[in-house]
Image (cartoon, grey):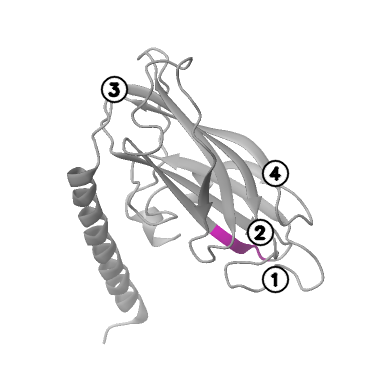
């Protein structure tokens, strides 16, 4: 007789295989539609503001019945697995950068810049992953996750030749994946750097293990 652990392993194997098929399909779509960007370049994303005017979580319910959200905001620029799901399947949350933490604030000004160097690897997109949670003493509640993709077909085109010539994009919006009314304003620029000035930082986690337990 098979025990619960056996069926749990079967479920995880099926889930990982299904996710992998979807990710590979999107990779092939990207290869057909997006330019390959190679060389050494830096991506800078200015996270401006979280707008959560009703003070709700991803369920649509208020963060607190009698109070406002205790917002904690994190982010990362993912060029390693941009088509994978949020969490351990792509960039584990432990690798994300803390950008804001406050009490009783639904729509905080973030005003922080995320930076990612691409050092010689060819990519077709960079996934700006953002996450807001309501930080509680006992249990943290997700407010929402947010996505924005930077590609060579985007508003800023390909990376600029130098930092001095790189222009910031117009203000852009990353809408909540569960509640689009919650959104984040941002802008970005990217530009080439020398090999000596390029500093890669790994963002992905432990294959399979992180994907199982996040």
- Mark 4 = which residue? 109
Looking at the rendering, the stretch of residues picked out in magenta corresponds to 139-144
Residue 134 is labelled as none
Q: Earlier in the sequence, mark 4 or mark 3?
A: 3
Which SS does the magenta portion mostly show? strand
Q: Earlier in the sequence, mark 3 or mark 2?
A: 3
Please give the name of the residue rendered at 66% of the width and 67% of the height, measured from the top-left corner: 56
Query: Contact (CB < 8 A) between labels 1 and 2?
Result: no
Label 4 Cα neighbours within 10 Å, binned few <14 / some 14-19 / many ≥20: some
Residue 96 visible: no
Residue 183, quarter of the rendered image: bottom right
Query: Contact (CB < 8 A) between labels 3 and 2?
Result: no
- Mark 1 = which residue? 62
Q: Is residue 44 left or right of residue 59?
A: left
Magenta-colored stretch includes residue 61:
no
Could you say where residue 120 lies in the image, as x and y percent from the top left?
A: 29, 24
Q: Say above or below: 61 vs 155.
A: below
> What is the C-alpha distance between the residues marked 4 and 3?
34 Å
- Mark 2 = which residue? 52
């Amino acid at each position: 007789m098979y025990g619960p652990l056996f069926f749990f392993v079967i479920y995880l194997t099926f889930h990982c295989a299904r996710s992998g098929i979807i990710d590979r399909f999107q990779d092939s779509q990207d290869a057909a539609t997006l330019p390959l960007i190679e060389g050494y370049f830096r991506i800078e994303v200015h996270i401006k503001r979280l707008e959560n005017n009703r003070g709700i979580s991803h369920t649509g319910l208020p963060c607190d019945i009698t109070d406002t959200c205790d917002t904690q905001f994190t982010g990362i620029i993912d060029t390693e697995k941009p088509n994978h799901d949020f969490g351990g399947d792509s960039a584990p949350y432990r690798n994300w950068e803390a950008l804001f933490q406050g009490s009783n604030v639904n729509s905080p000004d973030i005003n922080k810049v995320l930076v990612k160097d691409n050092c010689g690897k060819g990519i077709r997109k960079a996934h700006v992953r953002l996450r807001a949670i309501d930080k509680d003493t006992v249990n943290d509640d997700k407010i929402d996750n947010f996505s924005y993709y930077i590609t060579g077909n985007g508003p800023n085109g390909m990376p600029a030749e130098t930092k001095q010539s790189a222009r910031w994009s117009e203000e852009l919006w990353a809408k909540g994946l569960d509640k689009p009314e919650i959104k984040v304003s941002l802008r970005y620029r990217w530009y080439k750097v020398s090999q000596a000035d390029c500093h890669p930082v790994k963002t992905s986690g432990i294959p399979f293990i992180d994907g199982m337990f996040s």
